[in-house]
Image (cartoon, rainbow, N blue to C red):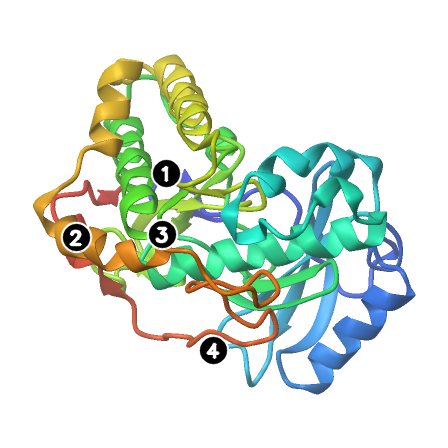
């Protein structure tokens, strides 16, 4: 495996062209049709094999297309499984979906709604400067994003890193995870809802649109990236604070095992929730978002067309609100 000065540059499962697993798994006729359309529209040149499989989705590698912003594409296909019936908690309490009852929807509708919710959350987080995979497009139960990895190898999840316990690199990654969580809370007005070592990737900065600190052109710099945003909820969700506390506890438990001196749950919550001066103006701008909206499907201020392609930046710029975040150049 390729490494960046001691840190694995990718996780497990390199994509191969036209594998049997490309044909199987979540690849039904409708999915094939939408992927073919994406290829014909220039989003990617070809869809290769599976690079990651979870209980609810499979991720395929797509080769860079003329419309992909200079990067390969990750194609996340949600499986048609029963587990989605248990996800109503994350949808029904979200004011953005106040006129849609998740549990009353059909299985196919639930699947499409979940994919749409993850796409909307990614767009919202990406536009707020949070380090997430750049969202490109959503169709039915398929989500197209920037591929974070090299030569078909995905970047590793936090749990896949093989570093010495107590290393300063773990401390730097912990600080980045906490900073990203705070930014998500204040700038995107979201709580991840399922944050853990499984949903945090460690990626080369030059692959990430929103970098926390450092030089995007430095191939040796890596940073935390948040992934899997289906469960993410608006701060107005009745369980938002409870979900935030669970996120912070899981992050603490993992980094404790890595020998990092972490914040107590109470201090971590205060750190995330406390308002910084730089966020005060942004808070004022959010007041309009809390006022009742006229009924237009599920739309509100932050809504976007699921088929609208966000602006793709090929020049990574350091977020001004993240000054002081530890920059990792492992050696």
Q: Residue 28: image x %, image y %?
A: 89, 60
The circle drawn on residue 322 is: none
Q: Nearer the viewer, mark 2 or mark 3?
A: 3
Marks 2 and 3, how far apart at CA: 24 Å
Residue 124 falls left or right of residue 21: left
Q: Residue 150: image x %, image y %?
A: 51, 59
Q: Nearer the viewer, mark 4 or mark 3?
A: 3
Closer to the N terminus: mark 4 or mark 2? Answer: 4
Closer to the N terminus: mark 2 or mark 3? Answer: 3
For the residue carrying disc 3, how many other residues have a C-alpha within 10 Å: few (<14), some (14-19), or many (20+)?
few
Marks 4 and 2, how far apart at CA: 25 Å
Closer to the N terminus: mark 4 or mark 3? Answer: 4
Per the image, the residue denoted by label 1 is: 6
For residue 40, above or below residue 289? below
Whether residue 214 is visible: no
Closer to the N terminus: mark 2 or mark 1? Answer: 1
- In this view, the residue in front, 182 or 25, is 182
SS at badge 2: helix
Q: Quadrant of the N terminus?
A: top right
Q: Residue 32: image x %, image y %?
A: 84, 69
Marks 2 and 1, how far apart at CA: 29 Å
Closer to the N terminus: mark 3 or mark 1? Answer: 1
Residue at the (52%, 59%) spot, across then down: 120
Closer to the N terminus: mark 4 or mark 1? Answer: 1
Residue 172 falls left or right of residue 225: left
The circle drawn on residue 69 is: 4
Per the image, the residue denoted by label 2 is: 321
Residue at the (21%, 29%) spot, across then down: 271
Marks 4 and 3, how far apart at CA: 34 Å
Per the image, the residue denoted by label 3 is: 290
Tell me, yes or no, whether the two marked residues, 2 and 1, touch with CB atoms within 8 Å: no
């Amino acid at each position: 495996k390729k490494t960046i000065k001691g840190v694995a540059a990718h996780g497990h499962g390199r994509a191969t062209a036209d594998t049997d697993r490309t044909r199987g798994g979540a690849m039904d006729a409708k999915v094939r049709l939408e992927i073919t359309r994406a290829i014909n529209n220039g989003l990617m040149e070809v869809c290769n094999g599976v690079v990651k499989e979870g209980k609810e989705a499979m991720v395929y590698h797509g080769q860079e297309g003329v419309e992909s912003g200079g990067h390969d594409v990750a194609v996340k296909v949600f499986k048609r499984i029963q587990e989605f019936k248990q996800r109503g908690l994350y949808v029904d309490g979200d004011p953005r979906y106040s006129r849609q009852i998740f549990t009353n929807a059909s299985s196919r509708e639930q699947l499409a709604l979940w994919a749409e919710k993850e796409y909307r959350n990614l767009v919202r987080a990406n536009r707020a400067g949070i380090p997430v995979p750049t969202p490109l497009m959503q169709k039915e139960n398929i989500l197209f994003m920037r591929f974070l990895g090299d030569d078909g190898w995905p970047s590793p999840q936090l749990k896949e890193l093989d570093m010495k316990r107590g290393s300063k690199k773990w401390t730097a990654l912990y600080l980045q995870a906490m900073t990203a969580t705070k930014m998500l809370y204040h700038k995107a007005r979201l709580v991840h809802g399922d944050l853990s070592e499984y949903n945090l990737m460690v990626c080369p900065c030059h692959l990430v649109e929103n970098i926390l600190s450092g030089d995007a052109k430095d191939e040796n710099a890596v940073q935390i990236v948040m992934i899997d945003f289906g469960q993410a909820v608006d701060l107005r969700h009745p369980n938002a604070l409870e979900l935030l506390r669970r996120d912070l506890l899981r992050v603490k438990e993992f980094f404790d095992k890595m020998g990092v001196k972490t914040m107590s749950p109470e201090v971590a919550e205060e750190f995330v929730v406390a308002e910084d001066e730089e966020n005060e103006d942004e808070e004022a701008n959010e007041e309009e978002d809390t006022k009742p909206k006229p009924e237009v499907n599920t739309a509100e201020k932050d809504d976007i067309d699921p088929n609208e392609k966000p602006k793709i930046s090929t020049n990574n710029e350091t977020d001004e609100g993240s000054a002081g975040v530890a920059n990792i150049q492992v050696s």
